[in-house]
Each structure stands twice: as C-alpha cells, then as structure tokens.
Amino acid sequence: MATTSNGNSKKRDGGLSSLAPRKINVQKFSEARAAELESLHSIVSERLNKDFRSKRNKRRRTNSYNNQPAKKRYIQRQKSESLIGQVSGGGDHETKITRRVKRRMELKGNPQSGFCTSGDGTKRLRTHVWHAKRFTMTKLWGFHLPLGLHGRGRGSRDVLKQSRQGVLLHDASYHIAVQLEGPEGSLLSILNMLLEPSPSSHSKEVFDSILTGRSYENAMLYHLEPPVSQAIAPVTYMWRPSQIPKRRDEEKGGDGIGTDRPVSDRDYVDFRKLWVWIHASSFTEGYAILKVACQKQMNETGVSVDCFSLEGQLAKLEIFGPKASHLLQKTLHPALSSSEDTSISKMCSMEKAEVKNVADPYKEENVSSGAILAQFVIDPRLILNSPRDDSTVSFETTKTEPTESLETTTNTEAETFPEVFNCLWDANRELNPPEEENMLCWEKHQSRLDSLCLDDPAADVPKVSSRLRSSRSCPLLLLKHKKLGNAPTGWSLILPVSWIKVFWNALVSKGAHAIGQREKRWVSCDDGLPFFPSDFPDCKAYSSFTLSEAADLEEKAQRRPPAIRPFRIPIPPPWNSIHVTRSIGESSNQKLTSNGTNGVEISSSGGNLFDGIVARTSDSLTTFLQTFTSDNLLLLPHNTSKTNLMKKLQEDDKKVRAQIHQSSKKLCLVRVLLHAFKEGSFEEGAVVCAPTLADISLLKSSCGEGEEGRVTMPQSSVSSYFQEQPSGSWELNVSEDTLTEQSHRWPIGFVTTGFVRGSKKPAAEAFCDAVLLGRLRDEQWRDKDVKRRKKQIYVLVRNLRSCAFRLALATIVLELQDSCDVHCF
C-alpha cells in the first residue's frame, strides 16, 4: 500500500490481497456468513420467545422518524421557499407566503449592504436573530436593539465580574459613519468649526498621529460656533491613513500630508478622506450639521467637500475586558494570499505585502492608546478549534516582529498603504461577502470522507445564491480603546456589514459574553465613564430618550390600582430649578446655607428642557469662570494657569466673550462622581443638594444614631418638593411652613446614572453647577489647614421618593483627567 506525505489518503496495491476492500457487497457477505447469522438468529429468538415485536415503551422512540405533523411542516416550508425562489426569479403568478417564512428567509440572507427592516420600517441588526432568542428586544433610535437579558433588570454582578475577569462583546452597528472627502485644509476647518476639543488644540505629536491616520480621536460635535451652541453627540473621527511626503511650501523639517491615490502633484498633497462615527440617536441631526458645514465651507472658499453616509455598509463590534487581546489572538489570523481564490490577492495586492503578526500587537505594551491597526484576516470559520491543520486553510500567514509604525510597505513603484484600507475606504467598491455556510460545510464533509478513504458518489455540490464572487478573507480595522482610569482594555472592530455574523458567531463561540444596552450602561457607570445619551443632558437625544422612558413608566403606573400607585416624580429632572439656588446664593452673600429666601422670588424659569451648557474641557470651564465670576472659585487649580488663560483670551477676545455673553444666564454644569460617605444608594434622578456645615458635622459623626443623627425632611414634603405645573413642567416648591423651610435643602444638580449592584466601589454619575460647587468648596475649605483640605466636595443626595439626605463625596471629573471629558463608553 502506498501512502501520501500526510498519511491520510491511501491507495490500494493489487499485489496485497490481505487488505480489506473499500466497498462490501452485502448479499455476498450474508451468503458467506449464512451459518453464523442463523445461529445468531436462533439465540436472539430464544431470548425473545420468538416475539420480535417492539416493546410498547420503545414504540414512540422507534417511530419518531415518521412524525407526520413535522413532515407536513417541513414539506410546506420547502414549498414556500421554492415559491420564494420563483418570485425572486421573476415569476408571473402570485404566491401567498406566510409572514414567518418571509421573515426567516429575509433574516437568513446576507446581502452585501443594508439592514433588513420590519413592517414599520425599524431596522434589524445582522445579529438580530441571535439576540432575539436570548435578550429582551426594544425599539430605540430606529433599530431593534437588545435591551438586556430577560428578567427585571438584575444580573449586574455577573456582568461586572465578566468585565473584570473575562471578555464582553457588544454589537455597536447602530453607530453610523459619515465620510467626508476634500482638501485637507477644508476638512480641518470643518472639524475646528464643529468639534470640541478641536484637532488644532492638540499637541503637535498627537495632531500628526491623528492626521496621518495612526490613531483616532474622540470629540463633542456641536452646532456651528461652539462651545456656546447646542451640543449634538460625542463622535469618533479618524483620517484615512497616508504617508507624509515633504510639502513644497513647508519649512525644512516640517511634516506634510500625502495622499492615498495617484493624482496630480497639486492634488497629491491635499485630497483626504475622513470618517465621523455618530450614534444612531443623533445621526440625523449630526449628519445635517456636517452637510451644512460643508456647504458653508464651499460658499466661503469655493472648494467642494463631499459628505455622504455609510449607513448599511460598515459594522462595528466592541470587545472589552482583560482577556480581549487573547480572544482576538484566537479569532483573527492574518492572510497573505490564497492558492485557490486568486481574486482576493488580485483585489487587495497582498502578495508582496508584509503583514504584521496578529498575536503580538494586541499586547498592552506593544500598541499605544487610541491606535488603529489594519488587518486582512482569514474567515474564522476556516480556523479549527484544535491545533491548526494547514490542509483545511488555504492561506499563508507570516509572523514578524511588531513595529511602532502601523503602515505596511509594498515593492510597487509608488509607496502606498495596504489595499485593506482601500477596500474599506472606497465607498464605490463592493466588498465580496463571505462564503455560504452550506458550501463550507460541504467542503468539510468531503475532507472528512477523504481522510477516512470513503467515497460519496451521491454527494453533489450545494446550491448557492446567484451573486457575485464570495470571499474567504475579510479586511477590517482594529481600534484600540483609550486607557481611562480603571476602564477595561478593549478594541473596536470595523468591518463590512456582510461579515458581521461570521465574526460574531466566532467570538461568542470562543468565550465572549454578549451584552445589551442595559449591561453596557452598568459597565460604563462602574468605570466612571459617561453613557450616551443618558449622561448627556445638553443633547436633544437625552430629552427624547428620557421623555420616552417617562411615558413608559407612566403607562405602567396607570395599570396599577390607585391605592398602591406611586406618586409622580419629574422625568427628566427639572434642571432649571438650579437657577433658584444660584439666585439665592448671590442674594445671601454667596452663602448656600441660608435657610431663608431673603425676598428672592422662587421661580425656576421654564419647563423640563435643559437650558445651559456642560463644560467638558478645562479651557471652556476656566474661561467661563474667569469671565463671569468676580470671586476666585477653587476649581481646576492645577490644570489651567491664569497666564495661559489670558493668552487664550487675547488671541480671540471679542469672539470668546461674545459667545460666552450669550450663555451668561445659562447653567454651566460639570460631570461629577458621587461616592456615599457612609451609607446610602443613589438612584437615577436623585437630587444633589448643598449641605450646611452643621449637616456635614452631624453626618460625619459616628455617634449619630436614629432620627437625631439623620438629616431628613417631612414625609409630607417629599411629593411636593417639585411641583408639576398645568403646562406639564416641573418647578421647585418651597413651603412657607417654618418646619418645612428649615429642612429644605437647595438643589445644585441631579444624578443621571445611579449605583450599580455588585460594584466594588459604587459610584453615581451626576451633573452639578460649576459655580455652586466652587462656592461649596470655598465654604468647606475655609478655616482649615492645607493638609486637611480634601479634593472632594461634600454634598447631600436624596432619592426623589425618600425623605433622607445622604452625605456623599463629589469628585469633579475634569480634575481627574488632563484636558477633556468627551470619552463615551
């Protein structure tokens, strides 16, 4: 017998008759063994008393193959699918197909672009079927999104444990990219016009890294003339990578910007492409303002800038946790070329390219925060879970040492970036979808038969859809999450939307724990990061989201009997009631501890809508405080010096002061983290109040027990602290009763995300007025030594349905970070 090199396939040698034949004739075999079979039959008949009927307890199991209802359903399904094929093929006759079959066929398909929609136009993610079987689904922002696991919203302990010890996976395909194309200077002008912090505000090193496409950046998208204008949403922007040839009009030693396609020399240094990723809740608003900015730029300069949406073309997966890098090592395997599918190598020109190793760059020490990696990887369905078998994978991989540069080089005449970028950045190019599942299963079956030296003459090549050529390798971009505090290390995968189910199934099967919107908010709160839109009260998406939540809660409350129906609370919180506290402090010599109103009119000046700005950068907060406060508020003492502030004001003094003058009467809020001093659990919507020095001493004392050691308000005043007006708005209500007036505490902010069960150090996220926080810190630092002054600020927090005020420590997030607070989880 002759064997091949791998030892799997065998060939028969005519001279060796002792080998067993490949095929056995059953009739000849029975005739040759007739005597043995008869003796065996006699033994069995004696044991069964010649009763060969099946036992009664075995009949149901032995007859299960002949299940008539299941057979009828299978025949009807096959008939319906065949009718659908006739209709799609252009049949003339009308066919009636059930909605269930239509939906199954629609979700089973994998078109190259776009999302399938339900009857009301709501889009479904490509992972909709997987989530709908396991999660509670909800309609949000035009999508069917997974809200969380089934139940009452518990299970946060397990999710937080997975975030600290395992891997979490989230389908973020509801984030949509907008692509901008045009000269580099025009694109930079648009970004500087709409984003805060603007690209030009970064250091030269960071600016060059972003501009060359080696890293991405987060920013807040505003309407025209930020930061006074209305905020839209936090966005992520990234440039198409390109090398930097030296410009003709630049000084020696300076950097220039190259291009990514062969054009004339004049266009070579200017034409660029840019992606801006926007959340689905604010996509319509953000896309519209980007188009307006492009039109304004064209009217002013005469240079055209294209702006179009990439909805339904690109998908985004988020992977985070301490084992995220290990999961990517097991799932992503780079591909150089294919011996079977030459179209892949022809399209992406990867034969001469040096592709970086996937395993090494995923380590924390090898990749900088916010870096972008480009990979061309093999279909994960072709990678075996056992040690890799090269006979099942038709791709060659190389392992090279990781380098600091993220570019790859080719030996072509002009230096360009790898074609993996072109595959994703060229909107006109149609990317090949993955191979059909039945084709891969048929090939695996044939390979197993060959390894067992068996033939399957009845096996036919499976039928596949009549589409263009499919592919077995996928281009993708890996975005390293920025390291912020105790946030888990993570990655974002950007890939064609037709490949989303392939990688989703591979990542889940290798140990990733899928989460929905509710679980993602838990993780973000545990890490001290804001969650959009719940922690962005200055955006329209927050108002619409909270109003929809209020309507759902009101509907649930109305279904309960009136006797046990809870009293109504304001949703969203009445932010404008903070104006009253500021006016009280100004009228009482800037002391918030005064119990009397001193003749100040109590009016919250207007409804539920947020009227103010949120300072998310140190420069904007310091500029606001130095411009409109006469006293020296002790905020951000170490981040921004007065010299730098005055220099900034002198650069564009008229513009800055004119913009801030428009918002002088608005609130200026900052995001704070609240930690309970001793006890208490802070819920979403809780009110943050200004404490007196007596309150702090009483609650800090360890001997305070019972009612005498607590700061409370009368139970009758809990439901009337905020009073609903006939117009539907909520206003702050201060009673003239002496007892109620003494127990009243003035609001300075509200909690947007409450405590999460299972957190090792529970923290709530709130937004408080910056001026009032500065005055509280001044009161609490007064007459204290420098060594005894705490960076945190003592505040009181009261849940809206509770009468007890809890002491908490408020930490301003801008004082923890270096420059900005625009990173969204």
Image (cartoon, rainbow, N blue to C red):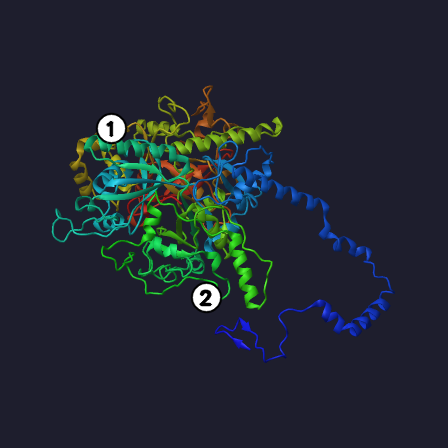
Judged from this view, the residue extending furthest toward the top is 726
Residue 771 horizontal side relative to residue 695, left or right: left
Residue contact between numbered discs 1 and 2, judged by CB atoms under 8 Å: no
Task: Look at discs 1 and 2 and give the one toward the viewer.
Answer: 2
Residue 753 in which image quadrant: top left
Task: Mark yes or no: residue 306 visible.
Answer: yes
Give the residue displayed 71% in from the left and 44% down from the top: 69
Residue 346 horizontal side relative to residue 516, left or right: left
Up-down relation of residue 223 to residue 643 (above or below): above
Please state which amino acid type lies under the numbered disc 1: His
Dot 2 surroundings within 10 Å: few (below 14), some, or many (20 or more)?
Answer: few
Q: Dot 1 lies on which element?
A: helix
Please state which amino acid type lies under the numbered disc 2: Asp
Q: Nearer the viewer, residue 392 or 178?
A: 392
Give the mark count.
2
Pinpoint residue 658: horizontal percent, then vertical percent: 22, 29
Q: Nearer the viewer, residue 94 or 784?
A: 94
Pinpoint residue 23: horizontal percent, then vertical percent: 64, 69
Look at the image and tell me in which quarter the C terminus lies: top left
Look at the image and tell me in which quarter the N terminus lies: bottom right
Up-down relation of residue 482 to residue 632 (above or below): below
Q: Nearer the viewer, residue 19 or 696?
A: 19
Task: Mark yes or no: residue 165 visible.
Answer: no
Cα distance, mark 1 to mark 2?
69 Å
Residue 661's tag is: 1
Dot 1 surroundings within 10 Å: few (below 14), some, or many (20 or more)?
Answer: some
Q: Nearer the viewer, residue 185 or 195?
A: 185
Find disc 2 in the rendering and name its residue: 390
Pinpoint residue 440: horizontal percent, then vertical percent: 51, 56
Up-down relation of residue 112 to residue 413 (above or below): above
Marked residue nearer the N-terminal end (1 or 2):
2
